[in-house]
Structure formats: structure tokens, C-alpha cells
Amino acid sequence: MSTATTPAPITLTRRRPARGLLARVTRTELRLFLREPVGLLWGLLFPVVLLVVLGSIPGTRKHGDDLDGQSVVEAYVPILTAFTFAMLALNAMPPVLAGYREKGVLRRLSTTPLPPSRVLGAQILIHGAVATLATAVITLVARFAFGVHLPRAPFAYVVTIALTALALFAIGLFVSAVAADTKVANGAGAVLFFVSMFFAGLWLPRAKMPDTLRTIGDCTPLGAGVRALGDATAGHWPHGSALPVLAGYALVFGIASARWFRWE
């Protein structure tokens, strides 16, 4: 899925301080993002529609032992939350940055006082804000339309979402940093997305996975993220290695993406 669009030039001179650069770049990137409805469609609208369709099916709101006492709708709320972040971080953002490099936009920006952190930060702010909005809508629709309880440990839920977002956006930035062009970024992002969503439980809920698959999933960012979100929803602080795994992905891929980021 490509949303790359040539941005409007950002006029910067060496005499102007770097203060406020992030805000200016973010405003420009936001205008470009809103011109392409693909990100909003897949990152915001699609998971909400999927939740509504799922919750409208008779029987999905009944609790069963095969999902650790949860209903199908309850089990899928953390998964759809992870879906929004994964879609935007792995599928939407890398083609944009790779497209900028391919079209020479990053090379032109490199001649200005604009550090790469401002470009990457603007992308994370925009896509992270859309994913956060989608998470809020999913949570509220699940609560008021289908009677799903709000997370019983809200602080743990927020911490988990923040770490999941950092881990996924760090991986997305790494793909953006090393991808040769838009096609490579699209392909790598799609592969990472579908593999990650499998371990998140999109097609087979984690409660129904064999122990081996669940253990492997606990070592992936979305497997660890959905597991921690489930714990927080049940009222527990995420136990085990879930949060350290997420923090590790964020740290390693964040450093790697900064190390290998290329203007051209």
C-alpha cells in the first residue's frame, strides 16, 4: 500500500533556528497525509468496521471456555488495536519515506538545517495519532455497542500501547531506512504485517494456538503486545517478558534505523 506523495517544499535557511521545525514539518506532512485517504481507511475505518461486523454476528458476544472465558468480541479488541498500529507503522509509513528518498525529496531536505529526526518524528506523530484515535474509537464502540468491559488496569493498558507503538514504529522506520525503493518498502512492510498479525491472533486467537506457536508469538512485537493488552484488560499488570520484549524491539530497531537512515 503506497501513500507516497511529493511534499510541498519546506523553506529553511541556515540563519533560522531549528526551534519549531518539528511542528512545521508535521503540519506539512499532515496535509499530505490527509490528501491520501488510504491511511485513514485502513488504519482508522477498517478495524472499526471489522469490529462492528464481528460484534453483529450472533454468538460472538457469548463467553466460552475455549477463549479463556472471553467472548470473541472481547478477544478481538486487543487484536484490532494492534492491527491499527501495525497497519500504519508497517504498511503506511515505510512507502512514504522510501518514496521521498526515491523522488529525491530527502536529498533536497538534506541541504537544509533539517535533521532527519524531524522528518521521522513528524511521520511517527501523524501515524501514531491516527492509531491512537482508532484505538479510542475501537474501545468505545466495543464498550457501548457490544458491552465489552473497559480495561480494568488502564495505566498498564496505556503503557502497553505506548511500548507496542514504539516497537512497531521503530521497525517501520528501520524498513524505511534500508529499503531501496517504494516497492521494496511495500513488500517488506506487507510481509512483516501479515506475519505479525498471525502471531497477534488475527486469524487464530492466541488462546487456541498450540503452546509452541504461542511461545514463539510471545517473542514477536504483536504477540507480546496483544498478550500484555489482554492482561491489562483483565486487570493485571502484564506479566512475564511482554513489556521487556516490546522495549527491546523499540530500542534495537530505533538505534538501527537512526544508524542506517539515508537521505539518498
Image (cartoon, rainbow, N blue to C red):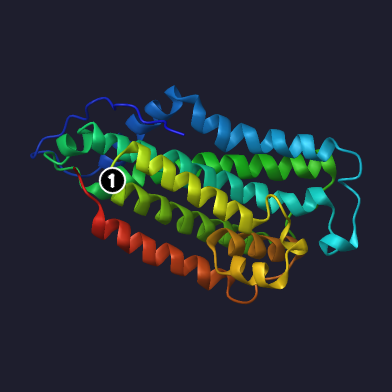
Compared to residue 188, the image places residue 45 above or below, namely above
Q: Quadrant of the C terminus?
A: top left
What SS does tag 1 mark?
helix
Pinpoint residue 124: horizontal percent, then vertical percent: 41, 46
Residue lying farthest to the left in this orientation: 15
Residue lying farthest to the bottom in this orientation: 240
Pinpoint residue 155: horizontal percent, then vertical percent: 63, 62
Taking the spot 46% from the left edge, 57% from the top edge, the residue there is 166
Q: Quadrant of residue 229?
A: bottom right
Taking the spot 71% from the left edge, 49% from the top edge, the residue there is 77
| Residue 182 relative to residue 77: left or right | left
Report whether residue 17 is seen.
yes
Of 113 and 33, the residue lying toward us: 33
Taking the spot 90% from the left edge, 58% from the top edge, the residue there is 64
Residue lying farthest to the top in this orientation: 35
Q: How many numbered discs, if any?
A: 1
Compared to residue 175, the image places residue 40 above or below, namely above
| Residue 178 relative to residue 107: left or right | right
Compared to residue 8, the image places residue 263 above or below, namely below
Q: Quadrant of residue 67?
A: bottom right
Q: Which residue is mark 1?
A: 118
Pinpoint residue 233: horizontal percent, then vertical percent: 73, 60
Taking the spot 50% from the left edge, 25% from the top edge, the residue there is 37
Q: Three-letter amino acid code at disc 1? A: Arg
Q: Residues within 10 Å of mark 1 (few under 14, many from 20)?
A: some
Report whether residue 20 is seen.
no
Compared to residue 129, the image places residue 212 above or below, namely below
Pinpoint residue 121: horizontal percent, then vertical percent: 34, 47
